[in-house]
Amino acid sequence: MEPIRVGLLGLGVVGGGTFKVLARNAEEIARRAGRRIVVTKVSARDLTRAKERVGNDAEVVTDPFEIVRDPSIDIVVELIGGTGIARDLVLEALAQGKHVVTANKALLAKHGNEIFALASSKGLMVSFEAAVAGGIPIIKAIREGLTANRIEWVAGIINGTTNFILSEMRDRGLPFADVLKEAQALGYAEADPTFDVEGVDAAHKLTLLASIAFGIPVQFDRAHIEGISQLSAVDIKYAEELGYRIKLLGITKRRADGIELRVHPTLVPSKRLIANVEGAMNAVLVKGDAVGDTLYYGKGAGEEPTASAVVADLVDVTRLHTADPEHRVPHLAFQPDSISDAPILSIDDVSTSYYLRVEVQDAPGVLADLARILADASISIGSMIQKPSADAPPRAEIIFLTHEAVERNVNSAIALIEALPTVSSKVTRLRLENLG
Amino acid sequence: MEPIRVGLLGLGVVGGGTFKVLARNAEEIARRAGRRIVVTKVSARDLTRAKERVGNDAEVVTDPFEIVRDPSIDIVVELIGGTGIARDLVLEALAQGKHVVTANKALLAKHGNEIFALASSKGLMVSFEAAVAGGIPIIKAIREGLTANRIEWVAGIINGTTNFILSEMRDRGLPFADVLKEAQALGYAEADPTFDVEGVDAAHKLTLLASIAFGIPVQFDRAHIEGISQLSAVDIKYAEELGYRIKLLGITKRRADGIELRVHPTLVPSKRLIANVEGAMNAVLVKGDAVGDTLYYGKGAGEEPTASAVVADLVDVTRLHTADPEHRVPHLAFQPDSISDAPILSIDDVSTSYYLRVEVQDAPGVLADLARILADASISIGSMIQKPSADAPPRAEIIFLTHEAVERNVNSAIALIEALPTVSSKVTRLRLENLG
């Protein structure tokens, strides 16, 4: 059979990796796909450098639109990133009747509904395994591997930078700022780390996971997002003492009244496998009603791991491009006419457990006041530790782990606690998930 | 669209679970598959009990051949098990032009080549996600999710019974026989536990994993199989002291000269995620050249987890049954004309690290003799511990961890060690994998 002809938009880390893996494993890939998959055209800003890289194997151009409009190209791989020109290119590729493979989570989290609608109307595939958790085939697992299940929730470590930072903070008892600097020096964090450390990148990915788990439109603007930059080393230490680790989790849950969609630092029982995912690794835990808990673990970023997902998508598209469009796996796992209008819930309506830390005067009755406020707000306490300080007058830190409670109630209780004259700090509030 | 009509052979644990999940999640499944998947006919030995179970939703018959020959049935689900009548039924279903979904690892490990050849010649699918690691979509991950990769090795905890027993032996320091009895009482082990505890079940599954990882025919009869019935609690304890856990792993590796295919108790560094998979859970670690290590974790058995995999296969077949057969995912992941003839290596040619334990006289020169024998066989020692005993004359147990060595050489060295007059026990030899 004739080779499938691929146009590659962008020859950065992932684009370069994709080119390399397709070349190195050409034979192995053809043994699987039944035909060769060949990059015939590449767009890159630096023509000279790109030509050095791809040699005579592919034509190199600077204008990516030249590729999406080239009638000889079967599949366009978008690896430019961002939501500007990437959006124009993907829409134009679809308008030109080409299937698209992309690693661009920001683009799909924000413009996925528009892109998937156009693709569906044209009978085209937009594949995005590489957009979430790098080389881990998590999109395939949820969209195809767990189709028997009513998915109950998904919780994932889906940003390697923050997991690396949290692992180092815990291992070495260092504050966030120090570890961030080190991560930047090692190349694990960008010069401007905001997207990673503030949870935006994880929220892009979570938005996609929620859509394929529950069959809802992408709704990035409804996600609740908190990063790790405000997390202090002392909470990591206390969590550890209580039998928990703190991970930046993307969590999406189906409830009777809607969908929870939230990214934030989360206490997880130390004995859970996902609590032991260290360094820059990713892992996604999926709970289905039939299968129970399943976990998927691997490298969430990097040249070749991400390329692994891009190429897997290319093989899928190669296999399925002659199939009836209505028999292919739907973009968001559910048939377009079966997409649900379940609302994304406000963070105030989220129900979970909490870690609360507060500094108080070490005096009789203080603890009783705190316990009373929590009880009045229907928040029951699972466990408590008290840490005396050496200050004068004597102070103590009190840490509560609560049972499941509604966030709105917890916030009201926190306001009352902070108003107590015996309380001398803000309340540190972290969410806790048992994931059991 | 008309529903897809499924005939269910067998209404035991998995058959009953499949019927239940298809009914309970009918709407969710149809939202994904684009049409309903309905069991219209069931075969079971006990007609009355089966009728109670399925009510008026499906016809119940005692003769499964009535189902495979029924022209109204689109897909046959074989959940009878074994390699006798199940083989006849699957071959007949294919002869009748029906797609097959099966959870039968023994059947495919032994007769897969014949079954897949017939299916390919007829343009039919034989799907078997449920045959390996229950609800974990590991077949899909390797066959479709990692197609970019040259797979280097696969190592899995793919038998829940033995993992439960090993977890309990370690946790509570109990001997194998005691824990087995308990596992039988709890329903984690069969009355005749041989298939599980001697590694046969794991070897069936490993045979299938090796075939889809490397594109080789199924060759169960070439697998090297050791179970856990001879494992003593003291080795679990010493391994722990050295920083390792003992797991029954199915391991298959690609080497320049062939494929390793082996099931045996294995020391794994305690810090690896797979070493922390406890109880009856399963996990499979896959190393690809592009993606690196990925791990897949979940319930490896049970009514609904296994049904989850059966139903996922039903959705796949429902989607793909109108596609060109040559564009579907090949049964063994690689195109039938690209199957490799790489030989399965003898266990003597396997190269790995070893744990060696031996009892010696606690006298000068004994350790030097042992070290000399290992050095002469080109086996280098990674670490060593010595455990004095309270016996008279004084004795000691010596435990070596070796670097990678060829098993043949290790066995020769063991024979020389056991012949030493200062050595007073057989050498206990376990294999060790760093999986790093």
Image (cartoon, coloured by chain):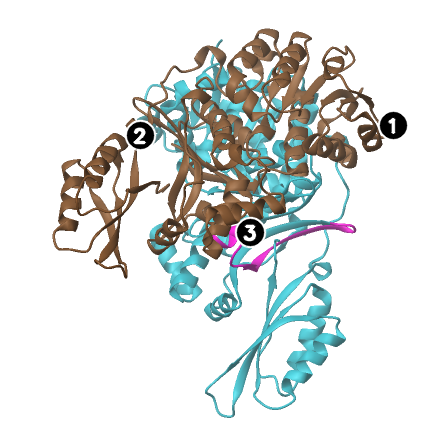
Chain colours: A brown, B cyan
Classify B242 as above or below A70.
below
Residue nearest the observer in this picture, A427 or B86: A427
Q: Name the residue that disc number 2 marks.
A: A350
Residue type, mark 3 in image: Val
Tell me whether marks 3 and 2 sit on the same chain.
Answer: no
Q: Nearer the viewer, mark 3 or mark 1?
A: 1
Chain letter belonging to callout 3: B
Question: Which residue range is magenta in the image?
Answer: B255-276
Left or right, B209 with reference to B196: right
Pick whichever, A318 or A117, lies toward us: A117
Nearer to us in this view, B179 or A420:
A420
Amino acid identity at mark 2 = Val
- Name the residue that disc number 1 marks: A56
Q: Are marks 2 and 1 on the same chain?
A: yes
**Left or right, A182 with reference to A435:** right
The label on residue B200 is 3
Q: Residues within 10 Å of mark 2 (few under 14, many from 20)?
A: some
Residue at 38%, 23% (x, y): give it: B23
Of the residues shown, which amino acid type is indicated by label 1?
Asn
How many neighbours does mark 3 have within 10 angstroms: few (below 14), some (14-19), or many (20 or more)?
A: many
Q: Are marks 3 and 1 on the same chain?
A: no
Q: Distance between the Cα atoms at labels 3 and 2?
A: 47 Å
* Observer able to see residue A203: yes
Under circle 2, the secondary element is loop
The image shows residue A386 at horizontal and vertical percentages of: 25, 55
Can residue B330 be spotted in the picture? no
User: CA gap, disc 2 to disc 1?
Assistant: 56 Å
| Residue A26: image location, x then y, percent | 78, 33
Percent across and percent down for residue A212 are 48, 24
Q: Label 3, label 1: how many angstroms apart (C-alpha)?
A: 51 Å
